Image (cartoon, rainbow, N blue to C red):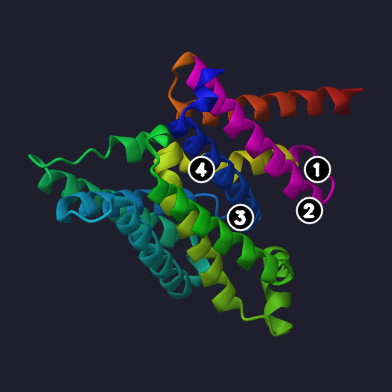
């Protein structure tokens, strides 16, 4: 296929593979801690940052990343303030992110604010700067997960036991949220803010349906994610489809097929 010889497609493929690797690796910790919606929340806040970046003439993806990180601090602060209603922090920050993004869009009328690519994804427009940013975030996420894997594993299943054993619960909760913010901040240009949480959750949902251990679920989620990213990009490139939407639809189809196969196997 001639499309593989195009530099824009090679950058897209590299960026997609990097996001496809780190999103489910982090997503499995979020899903099992019932924090699946945090991806949507940080994505909406990131869009507000992107809009501000366009307004002030600063690299939009970087401003969106900063906004996402600041929102992660706010979420953890609110989670401590409302311990019995931890999910309330996510709802509050999401509402604020949507409101701020809408306000900045209004201010940007008449300016060159092409935020559509950040809403729905525009992986074919990835620049080398974008790709280096994605690579940097990937390295940070993978290193942090490697260093604190056992601690995050224990917190995921039993926070009380983790606290008693001396694990810095507050610091690791904040680290998890910041890592999520980093992933969201760089992924919005690849699959879009409206679809980005799918990469965090759907591969994990598929793996949890068939895996018999946590370690296997991690690897299966990673495989599902990469198949969908590479297959979706190739299909979108060949048939001129929207790449972000194609990736997410492939993930959903794979999840449905997985559930059907598991159902038939269980009935045998």
Q: Position of residue 74 (x, y in %)?
A: 38, 68
Which residue is the extreme one toward the top?
239
Q: Secondary structure at mark 3?
A: helix
Residue under label 2? 214
Task: Locate the N terminus by quadrant.
Answer: top right
* Foreground: disc 4 or disc 1: 4
Region of the chain picked out in magenta, as a range: 209-238
Horizontal arrangement in the rendering, residue 215 relative to residue 77 (left or right): right
The residue carrying pointer 2 sits among few (fewer than 14), some (14 to 19) or many (20 or more) residues within 10 Å by Cα, namely few
At horizontal 29% and vertical 49% (from top left) the residue drawn is 98
The residue carrying pointer 1 sits among few (fewer than 14), some (14 to 19) or many (20 or more) residues within 10 Å by Cα, namely some
Q: Are marks 2 and 3 in contact (CB under 8 Å)?
A: no
Residue under label 4? 15
Residue under label 1? 211
Q: How many marks?
A: 4
128 falls in the magenta region: no
Horizontal arrangement in the rendering, residue 197 relative to residue 151 (left or right): left
C-alpha separation, residue under disc 1 versus residue under disc 3:
17 Å
Q: Are marks 1 and 3 in contact (CB under 8 Å)?
A: no
Q: Secondary structure at mark 4?
A: helix
C-alpha separation, residue under disc 4 versus residue under disc 3:
17 Å
């Amino acid at each position: 296929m001639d499309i593989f010889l195009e530099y824009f497609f090679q950058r897209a493929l590299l960026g997609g593979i990097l996001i496809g690797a780190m999103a489910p690796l982090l997503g499995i910790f979020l899903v099992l801690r019932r924090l699946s919606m945090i991806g949507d929340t940080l994505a909406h806040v990131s869009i507000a940052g992107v809009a501000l970046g366009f307004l002030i003439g600063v690299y939009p993806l970087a401003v969106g990343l900063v906004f996402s990180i600041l929102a992660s601090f706010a979420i953890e602060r609110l989670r401590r303030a409302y311990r019995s209603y931890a999910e309330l922090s996510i709802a509050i920050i999401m509402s604020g992110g949507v409101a701020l993004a809408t306000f900045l869009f209004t201010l940007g009328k008449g300016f060159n604010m092409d935020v559509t690519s950040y809403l729905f994804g525009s992986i074919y427009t990835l620049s080398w700067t974008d790709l280096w940013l994605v690579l940097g975030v990937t390295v940070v996420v993978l290193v942090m997960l490697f260093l604190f894997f056992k601690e995050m594993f224990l917190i995921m299943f039993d926070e009380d036991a983790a606290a008693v054993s001396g694990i810095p619960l507050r610091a690791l909760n904040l680290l998890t949220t910041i890592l999520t913010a980093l992933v969201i901040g760089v992924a919005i240009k690849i699959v879009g803010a409206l679809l980005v949480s799918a990469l965090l959750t759907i591969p994990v949902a598929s793996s949890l349906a068939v895996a018999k251990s946590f370690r296997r679920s991690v690897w299966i989620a990673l495989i599902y994610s990469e198949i969908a990213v590479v297959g979706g990009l190739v299909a979108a490139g060949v048939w001129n489809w929207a790449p972000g939407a194609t990736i997410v639809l492939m993930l959903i189809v794979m999840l449905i097929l997985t559930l059907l196969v598991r159902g038939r196997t269980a009935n045998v």
